[in-house]
Image: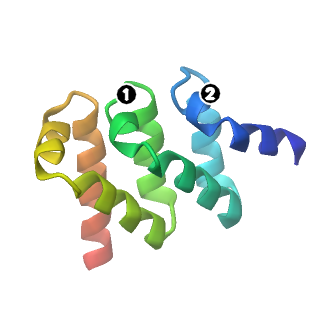
């Protein structure tokens, strides 16, 4: 429990770390909903920048795939808030994968 608490307190730094991002992704995939919610709330505060980061973009994609529907919607709203930034993100070498994952998840929900 103490180890996971330490991970949750350092989500922003770990998300950008070459190896630490895998720990955050593991929490998003296998952690209880309360831990996934904490991770999503933390990364949502800077999702535009994290989506463009070479390493952290993988965490954002994982949050889109494994977060609760409400959290996914918050990410979608934050990413689409500015049409110009969203278009730029879609053409960014890391951000384009985040946009692709977002669209994939939206299609799943629509079915």
Task: Tell me residue 65's x, y (percent).
Answer: 43, 56
Task: Tell me residue 11's x, y (percent).
Answer: 62, 38
Q: Which quadrant of the figure has residue 35? A: bottom right
Density class for disc 1 (Cα within 10 Å; few <14, some 14-19, many ≥20) is some
Residue drawn at x 13%, y 35% is: 91
Q: Is residue 9 left or right of residue 17?
A: right
Which residue in the rendered view is the most extreme toward the top? 18
Task: Give the label on residue 71, or none.
Answer: none
Which residue in the rendered view is the most extreme toward the right? 2
Does residue 50 sit above or below 87 in this rendering? above
Element type at marker 1?
loop
- Of the residues under marks 2 and 1, which one precedes in the sequence? 2
Residue drawn at x 10%, y 45% is: 84
Residue drawn at x 17%, y 43% is: 85
Does residue 10 sit above or below 102 in this rendering? above
Task: Tell me residue 87's x, y (percent).
Answer: 11, 44
Viewer-nearest of discs 2 and 1: 1
The residue labelled by disc 2 is 20
Gap in angstroms between the C-alphas marked 2 and 1: 14 Å
Element type at marker 2?
helix
The residue labelled by disc 1 is 53
Q: Is residue 21 left or right of residue 108?
A: right
Density class for disc 2 (Cα within 10 Å; few <14, some 14-19, many ≥20) is some
């Amino acid at each position: 429990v103490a180890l996971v608490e330490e991970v949750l307190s350092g989500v922003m730094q770990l998300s950008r770390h070459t190896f630490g991002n895998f720990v955050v992704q593991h929490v998003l995939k296998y952690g209880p909903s309360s831990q996934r919610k904490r991770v999503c709330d933390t990364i949502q505060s800077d999702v535009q920048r994290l989506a463009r980061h070479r390493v952290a973009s993988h965490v954002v994609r994982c949050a889109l795939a494994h977060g609760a529907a409400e959290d996914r919607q918050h990410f979608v709203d934050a990413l689409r808030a500015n049409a110009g930034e969203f278009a730029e993100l879609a053409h960014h070498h890391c951000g384009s994968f985040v946009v692709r994952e977002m669209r994939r998840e939206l299609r799943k929900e629509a079915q």
